[in-house]
Image (tube, helix red, strand yellow):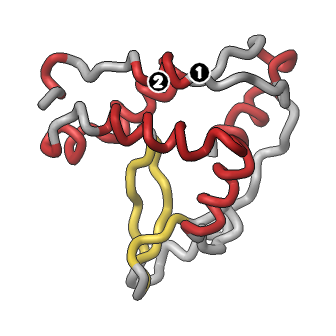
Amino acid sequence: MNIQSKGEHLGLLEKKKTNIPSSAPNFSIVGLLGRPVPALKTEHGLRGLRSDGSTVFPKKVKKYFEASFSDNYGAVRHCMKVVAGRFSKESLSKNLGRLGYDLYTSFRPKVPDGGAGWGVKATFDCKVLLSCEPPSSSSR
């Protein structure tokens, strides 16, 4: 989602046409990192949809993150759970989209701006992630 948006903004990717079945009775829009995401309620729970209307499967997302973080996947996941534990459930349920994106921008690896940063390998630092604190009104 963010990759597509950034690529379109930089002129490196064409805007995708969507084929989302918005008339389906189990269709809904959910917030993810401050953005509206089309989703379907399935027998296995809520599932996000790609622009072509196909379902996003959690196991494939997990494999993507495992490949991205390789040997550090377990440590990164643990750090994310620690940081998430600093937020009240009420705050997360009300503000997860905005809080999630704000957190992401505070710990994402630094790469050059614009096209120069496109596809650049970066180093993820768990210490930066662990330094993230919720705004005072969002903590436990």
Q: Is residue 78 above or below residue 105?
A: below
> Which residue is pictured at 40% across the width and 35% down the height?
100
In this figure, what is the number of numbered marks? Answer: 2
Q: Which mark is residue 129?
A: 2
* Quadrant of the rendered image containing residue 80: top left
> Which residue is pictured at 41% across the width and 71% down the height?
46
Where disc 1 sits, the SS reads: loop
* Quadrant of the rendered image containing residue 134: top left
Q: Amino acid at mark 1?
A: Asp
Q: Amino acid at mark 2?
A: Leu
> Residue 89's spot in the image, x, y percent?
16, 45
> Which residue is pictured at 37% across the width and 19% down the height?
132
- Taking the view exactly as shown, the residue that stands out farthest to the top is 112
Q: Which mark is residue 125?
A: 1
> Which residue is pictured at 67% across the width and 15% down the height?
110
**Dot 1 crowding, Cα within 10 Å, few <14, some 14–19, many 20+:** few
Residues 134 and 52: in front is: 134
In this rendering, position of residue 87 left or right of residue 18: left
In this rendering, position of residue 119 left or right of residue 76: right
In this rendering, position of residue 34 left or right of residue 68: left
Residues 32 and 76: in front is: 76
In this rendering, position of residue 122 left or right of residue 136: right
The CA span between labels 1 and 2 is 7 Å
Q: Quadrant of the C terminus?
A: top left
* Quadrant of the rendered image containing residue 94: top left
> Residue 69's spot in the image, x, y percent?
68, 41
Residues 25 and 40: in front is: 40
**Dot 2 crowding, Cα within 10 Å, few <14, some 14–19, many 20+:** some
Contact (CB < 8 A) between labels 1 and 2?
yes
Q: Which mark is residue 42?
A: none
Q: Is residue 128 above or below residue 82?
A: above
